[in-house]
Image: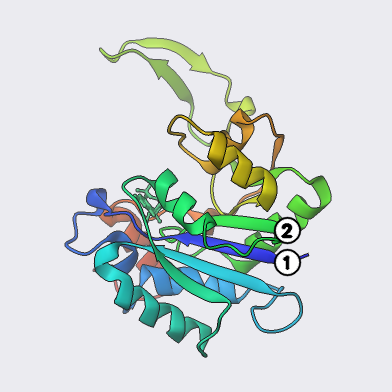
């Protein structure tokens, strides 16, 4: 069965406080998106050998040419298995735009944030394997280290949440394509991740063990941490 990976890179990244959209901010001299694609091309499935993997990158309209250049550079050769499409105003709209470019008949689709630029390829492989064995949605999750409180608007603590029941979830999130497409068609509200949208359509979702390296670059502090992990100098 074939696999497609949709990498969403169309966000502005306002919290990073940089002029360029987040996926195009340099990390150790290369855009975040280029690092994210390293992981996709490192998948055991292989983009050119073994099982076929299709790559769809979702980019801001203003950065289409730059995104195409990054994708071609990462792919090594121009390939009809890779494409770049324009994103939307929200992450959910960007994912929908990416899904529209996925080949019909694809078995498993992974949705991944370009901002999780250091995600190991092995996590992609683990999610694909789990989707194929469970036929449901699969998301990487990590235990929550901090104690979590429910608070009201004034900051008063209402409740301590049982941490043992919580997981901090990451991407890539994997789904059987037909069910995810139907769930996107049925969605009438905005969800915070694809798994929530998929679950709202009545489908089961399970977790696999996440990876600390799959953290999302959101603030300049995250970018510095990523630089340090790559062994470069902090900016
Ligand atoms: O903003 P945040 O970090 O939550 O975005 C997560 C991912 O979704 C990023 O890789 C970002 O580029 C992408 N995104 C998108 N289109 C949007 C908003 C976010 O592709 N409109």
Residue 27 image position (x, y, % from top left) = 33, 71
Tell me the quarter of the image containing the C terminus. Answer: bottom left
Q: Is residue 195 above or below residue 1?
A: above
Q: CA distance from mark 1 to mark 2?
A: 5 Å
- Which badge, 1 or 2, comes first in the chain's sequence? 1
**Mark 1 crowd level (few <14, some 14–19, many ≥20, 10 Å Cα):** some
Question: Where does label 2 land, which residue?
Answer: 107
Q: Could you tell me which residue is drawn at 59 percent across and 43 percent down? A: 142
Q: Is residue 168 visible?
A: no
Considering every residue shown, the one lying at the far bottom of the view is 77
Looking at the picture, tell me which residue is in the foreground, 69 or 115. Answer: 69
Mark 2 Cβ and ligand 1 under 8 Å apart: no
Q: Secondary structure at mark 1?
A: loop
Q: Is residue 138 left or right of residue 66?
A: right
Q: Could you tell me which residue is drawn at 37 percent across and 68 percent down? A: 32
Q: Could you tell me which residue is drawn at 77 percent across and 58 percent down? A: 129
Residue 38 image position (x, y, % from top left) = 52, 75
Question: Where does label 1 land, which residue?
Answer: 2
Q: Is residue 1 visible?
A: yes
Q: Are marks 1 and 2 in contact (CB under 8 Å)?
A: yes
Q: Is residue 172 left or right of residue 53?
A: left
Q: Could you tell me which residue is drawn at 31 percent across and 77 percent down? A: 65
Tell me the quarter of the image containing the N terminus. Answer: bottom right
Q: Quadrant of residue 23?
A: bottom left
């Amino acid at each position: 069965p074939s696999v497609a990976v949709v990498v969403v890179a169309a966000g502005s990244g306002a919290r990073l406080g940089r002029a360029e959209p987040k996926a195009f901010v340099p990390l150790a001299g290369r855009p975040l998106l280029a690092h994210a694609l390293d992981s996709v091309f490192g998948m055991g499935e292989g983009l050119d050998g073994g099982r076929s993997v299709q790559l769809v990158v979702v980019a801001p309209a203003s950065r289409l040419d730059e995104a195409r250049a990054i994708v071609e550079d990462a792919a090594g050769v121009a390939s009809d298995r890779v494409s770049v499409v324009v994103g939307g105003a929200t992450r959910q709209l960007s994912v929908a735009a990416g899904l529209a470019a996925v080949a019909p008949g694809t078995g498993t689709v992974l949705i991944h944030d370009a901002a999780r630029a250091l995600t190991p390829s092995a996590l992609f492989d683990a999610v694909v394997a789990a989707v194929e064995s469970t036929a449901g949605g699969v998301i990487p999750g990590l235990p929550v280290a901090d104690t979590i409180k429910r608070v009201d608007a004034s900051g008063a603590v209402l409740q301590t949440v049982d941490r043992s029941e919580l997981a901090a979830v990451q991407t890539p999130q994997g789904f059987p394509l037909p069910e995810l497409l139907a769930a996107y068609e049925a969605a009438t509200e905005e969800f915070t991740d694809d798994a929530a949208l998929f679950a709202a359509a009545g489908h089961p979702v399970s977790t696999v063990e996440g990876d600390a390296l799959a953290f999302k670059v959101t603030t300049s502090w995250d970018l510095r941490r990523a630089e340090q992990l790559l062994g470069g100098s902090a900016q």
